[in-house]
Structure formats: C-alpha cells, structure tokens
C-alpha cells in the first residue's frame, strides 16, 4: 500500500531529495510549496511566498488529501533556509527577529494541529523533520544568524513536546540532520525506516520511544 | 564597587537577587517594570545610593535603549548583566509571540544595548533559563510557548557565547528550580523554593569563577547540570 506523505517545503535541498526518494519508493507525496515538483506522484498545491500561507491554504490541501486518501502517513517538514541571514550579537533588528520566530514556530504548530486528524488515521503516524546539526544548542559553534538558529532549535523543542503528547497514541518521529555531500543513509530512507520497538519490553528498551536527532551515519546529535 | 544590572527586579527572584547583591556590597541597577509595585522602594530606603531603579520593559526596544542611556548617565560601566525578567504564558499563537518577546528577544535586546557598557569590568552575562528549555529531558505535553521561548534563549546564548567568550566574557545560564514566583501574574502557592533561596544560589554561581569558562552549561539551584 502506498504511503501518503504531506511535505511542507521550505526551500530545503535535502527535503527535495527526500521527496524524490519517497516518490520512488511507493509514496504519494503532497507538497505545500511554491516550487514545482519533479516527480509524477507529487501534487503541488498552494503556492507560497516567504510570508507564511494563510490558514485556508493548508486547510484546502488537507481537505483534498482527505477526499483522495483519507489519511496521512508521514508529515514532513524541512527547516527554512530562506530565513534571512543576520549578524553576530550587537547588530540586530530585534523586531524582525521576533517576527521570524513567531511566524515559524506558530506556523509549524498550526500545520501539525491541522494535520493531526489525518495523521491519526495513517499507518505510520509519523512526523519528520530535516534539520541541521547547527540546530543543536550543544553542538552549534556558529556565532551569528540568530533567526535561523533560534527557529531551528525551537522547532526541535516543538518536536519533543509533540513526541511527548503523541507517542502514547503510537506516533513516531524522525529528526534527520542533513549535510552537503555526506554519505550514509539518505533522509528519505531514514524517514521510512522502522526503529526497534517491542511494547512488551520496558519502555526504555525501544528506540522508537526516544526522541533523537541523527545524521546520515545515524550518529546521534545532542540537543 | 562592582556594578550589576538586573532585569525583572520588581519582585520574585529578581527582587531577591537585588537584595542579595546589595547585601554583598554591589551597586545595583534594578530594571523596574511595575511602577505600582513598591518593594524596590523599601529596598531603596535601606540601601540609598547603591540602588538605582531604572524603568524597563525588556519587550520594548525603545525602553531598553532608554534604560541603557540612563545607566550610562550614572556610570561608566557595569560588571554584570543579569537577565531575570520572564513570563509564563501558554495557549495561543499570541502567547507564543509574547513569550518569545520577553523570554527570548528581551535578553538579546538587553545584551545588545548594554554591551557598550561592558567593555571593562568583569564582563559577565547571566541568563535565567529553565529545565523547560531542555529538549533532552522535556517531559511536558504542552506549554509550547514557554518551552520554545526558553530553548530559543539557550540557542541565543550559545551564539553569544561563541562570539564573546574569546573577548573575555563569562556566561551563566541558570535554571532556578520550581520557585513560588509571579511568573503567571500572581505569586504561586506551589513550588519547591522561595525566590530568596534560589537567588542565593544564583548569586554564588554568577559571582564565582570556574576553571572551565570555555564550557557553556545550564546549571540549577542544586548546582547540578542539565543537558540542552
């Protein structure tokens, strides 16, 4: 049976590759994006500029998915690399920073909430994020681009809180760190992979019961 | 005499910290948000010139700039900036923006405005974070607005740390524990600590040196370390 994927595109190159992988591995990918989709099974809807789309855009697409498929198996996000670059401490337009933070965090949460009814009917019940190691407070060594880094870290926390809320319902989560020219396992493959899970074992004995971020070599990146 | 600026000084932990620093001989600049709250007035009567009350709303760029200008009129430099002001709100897109404005962007506004006053002195930047910011250990099933605002603060402090550490700045990122504070508007009747208890620990952590100032940690009221 085909997997039904809803991809919320943010100009993330790795996400494009992941969609291509998913499309060629028995997934039907719906895309909320302003960019044309490359694969036949993709359905492009609701063109969107940098400013977040209005609520009715995602609602319209979800209504279409509900009519066509009746479910979503994987809701896929990618971090937004189009967030404007900014400088190091001492040089910020703080109102602009606040606007970017509010828009990105609220929009992501709004989409998850809107998609939950269809995700609950899905087979995978999975939420995925293609992010970067620089989203990690522990790992990051950068000293600028506050907007990007804070949004990326904030979205990791959003993921963890939804993990806490939804894991008891059987939801699963995949947080993947993309790197340019990296080998290892592709984002698309990791997004579909199962992680060990045995409901009869102690909770901590199942990897599916942990919210972790991994790179293409499946090394865990600390938060 | 060493000089500290403390935000959110009207009441709760911020007020307790003001008293703590004053008792230890510091000149305190107290960021005052609530003119109708008069606890700082009583402290002023006790400590006189060593306490300066500065009107401050960390959610307003104009207010932060005016506060920095006022402090600059009174002193050449400050040794330490303590970012204590914070709110706890949840439930809507608007509350998320409010939390981000006060808890995350507020400290960035403060650091940017006060850095010119910190080129001499002890160069200490202190931030009140929270266990709620720890993605590793987050157990909550809600409180998105507050948790995200504190995680974003931790990331902002990381970026500041990487930039300013080579310039001699030292950083403190502190989780005060579950404190009976006014974070939700009224003083909480539940919690494990009174503001004075966690302020005393914060004072020790903020003013003492570490052999490993090149490591950014989130430490708590029990002097234990939290993962990010």
Image: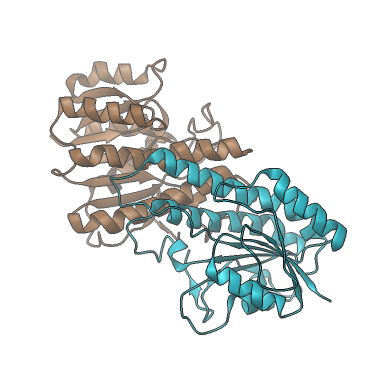
Chain colours: A cyan, B brown
**Residue visible at 34% across and 64% down in the picture:** A141
Left or right? Give the position of B113 relative to A93: left
Placement of A103 over or under B26, stated as above or below? below
User: What residue sits 58% from the left and 79% below the top?
Assistant: A186
Give me the residue at 41% from left, 54% from top.
B155
Q: Say which residue appears at 51% left-offset and 72% top-offset.
A: A178
Above or below, A103 relative to A78 = above
Is residue B163 in view from this perspective?
yes
Query: Total marks drawn?
Result: 0
Task: State which quarter of the image contains the N terminus of chain B.
Answer: top left
| Residue A117 position by quadrant | bottom right
Q: Is residue A207 visible?
A: no
- Residue A5 at what x, y percent from top left? 73, 66
Name, please, the residue furthest toward the front.
Answer: A36
Q: Is residue A206 left or right of residue B210?
A: right
Q: Position of residue A51 (x, y in %)?
A: 56, 46
For the residue pair B199 and B148, the one nearer the viewer reads as: B148
Picture coordinates of residue A176, whole percent (x, y): 56, 70
Quarter of the image for residue B75 reads top left
Q: Considering depth in this image, is B207 or A178 the residue closer to the camera?
A: A178
| Place of residue B225 in the rendered image (x, y in percent of width and height, measured from the top left) | 40, 58
Image position of B76 (left or right of B227): left
The one of A79 and A136 positioned closer to us in this rendering? A79
Question: Which quadrant of the figure contains the C terminus of chain B?
Answer: bottom left
Q: Report the front residue among A166 and B225.
A: A166
Compared with A191, A169 (above or below) is: above
């Amino acid at each position: 049976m085909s997997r039904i994927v809803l991809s919320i595109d943010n100009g993330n190159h790795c996400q494009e590759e992941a969609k291509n992988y998913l499309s060629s591995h028995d997934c039907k990918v719906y895309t909320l994006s302003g960019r044309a989709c490359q694969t036949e099974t993709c359905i492009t809807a609701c063109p969107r500029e940098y400013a977040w789309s209005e609520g009715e855009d995602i609602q319209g697409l979800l209504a279409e998915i509900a009519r066509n498929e009746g479910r979503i198996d994987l809701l896929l996000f990618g971090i937004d690399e189009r967030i404007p670059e900014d400088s190091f401490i001492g040089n910020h337009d703080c109102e602009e920073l606040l606007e970017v933070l509010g828009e990105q965090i609220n929009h992501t949460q709004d989409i998850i909430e809107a998609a939950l009814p269809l995700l609950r009917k899905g087979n995978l019940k999975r939420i995925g994020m293609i992010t970067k190691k620089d989203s990690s407070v522990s790992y990051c060594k950068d000293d600028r681009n506050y907007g990007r880094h804070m949004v990326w870290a904030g979205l990791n926390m959003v993921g963890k809180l939804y993990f806490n809320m939804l894991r008891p319902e059987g939801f699963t989560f995949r947080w993947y760190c993309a790197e340019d020219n990296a080998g290892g396992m592709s984002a698309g493959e990791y997004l579909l992979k199962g992680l060990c899970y045995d409901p009869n074992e102690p909770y901590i004995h199942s990897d599916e019961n942990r919210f972790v971020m991994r790179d293409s070599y499946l090394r865990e990146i600390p938060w | 005499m060493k000089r500290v600026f403390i935000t959110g000084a009207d009441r709760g932990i911020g007020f307790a910290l003001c008293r703590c620093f004053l008792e230890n001989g510091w000149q305190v600049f107290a960021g005052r948000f609530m003119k109708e709250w008069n606890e700082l007035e009583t402290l002023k009567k006790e400590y006189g010139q060593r306490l300066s009350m500065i009107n401050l709303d960390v959610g307003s760029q104009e207010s932060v700039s005016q506060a920095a200008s006022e402090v600059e009129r009174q002193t050449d430099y400050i040794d330490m900036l303590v970012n204590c002001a914070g709110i706890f709100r949840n439930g809507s897109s608007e509350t998320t923006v409010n939390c981000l404005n006060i808890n995350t962007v507020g400290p960035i506004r403060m650091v940017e405005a006060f850095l010119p006053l910190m080129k001499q002195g002890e160069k200490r930047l202190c931030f009140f974070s929270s266990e709620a910011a720890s993605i590793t250990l987050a157990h909550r099933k809600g409180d998105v607005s507050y948790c995200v605002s504190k995680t974003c603060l931790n990331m902002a402090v990381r970026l500041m740390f990487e930039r300013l550490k080579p310039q001699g700045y030292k950083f403190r990122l502190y989780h005060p524990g579950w404190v009976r504070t006014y974070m939700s508007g009224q003083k909480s009747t539940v919690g494990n600590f009174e503001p004075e208890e966690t302020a005393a620990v914060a004072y020790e952590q903020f003013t003492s040196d570490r052999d490993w100032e090149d490591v950014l940690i989130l430490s708590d009221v029990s002097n234990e370390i939290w993962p990010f």
